[in-house]
């Protein structure tokens, strides 16, 4: 439903690149299981987002400045 609401705002290239999968077998026709985590039927090990989460948390002051800048620009 969300996609259908957003779809008119996407250009044709973006619309054509979005493919919804209904099961892992259909996903594996587009994405090689060797690069997917085990949770998605892949062989790349368990999904672990610890490192990127830590990196984003370290950037909290940057995001605060960005938010202040956006608020100032949109006044």
Image (spheres, rainbow, N blue to C red):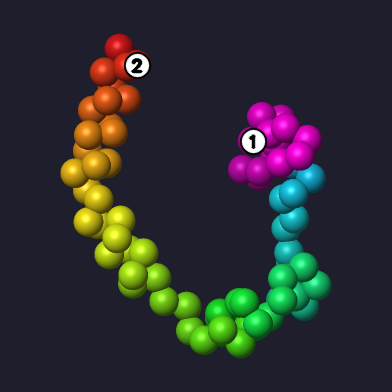
Q: Main secondary structure of the magenta part?
A: helix
Quarter placement of the N terminus = top right
Outermost residue to the left: 61
Q: Is residue 23 visible?
A: no
Quarter placement of the C terminus = top left
> Depth-wise, is mark 1 or mark 2 nearer the camera?
2
Q: Secondary structure at mark 2?
A: loop
Residue 46 screen position, x and y as percent: 48, 84
Mark 1, residue position: 6
Residue 54 screen position, x and y as percent: 27, 64
The residue stretch that appears in magenta: 1-14
Q: Residue, x 25% and y 50% (percent of image)?
A: 59
Q: Nearer the viewer, residue 24 or 32?
A: 32
Dot 2: few (<14), some (14–19), or many (≥20) neighbours within 10 Å? few
Outermost residue to the top: 75
Residue 62: image quadrant is top left
Please report whichever mark, 1 or 2, sits nearer to the chain's N-terminal start.
1
Judge whether residue 27 is colored magenta: no
Residue 13: image quadrant is top right
Q: Is residue 38 visible?
A: yes
Mark 2, residue position: 74
Q: Is residue 4 toward the left or the right of residue 52 in the image?
A: right
In this rendering, the answer to whether 29 lies above or below 63 is below
Q: Residue, x 26% and y 18% (percent of image)?
A: 72
Q: Residue, x 22% and y 48% (percent of image)?
A: 60
Residue 4 screen position, x and y as percent: 70, 40
Q: How many marks?
A: 2
Residue 40: image quadrant is bottom right
Q: Residue, x 77% and y 68% (percent of image)?
A: 30
């Amino acid at each position: 439903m969300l996609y259908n609401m957003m779809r008119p705002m996407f250009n044709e290239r973006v619309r054509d690149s979005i493919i919804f999968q209904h099961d892992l077998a259909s996903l594996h026709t587009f994405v090689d299981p060797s690069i997917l985590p085990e949770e998605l039927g892949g062989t790349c090990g368990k999904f672990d987002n610890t490192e990127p989460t830590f990196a984003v948390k370290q950037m909290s002051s940057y995001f605060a400045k960005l938010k202040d800048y956006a608020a100032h620009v949109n006044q």
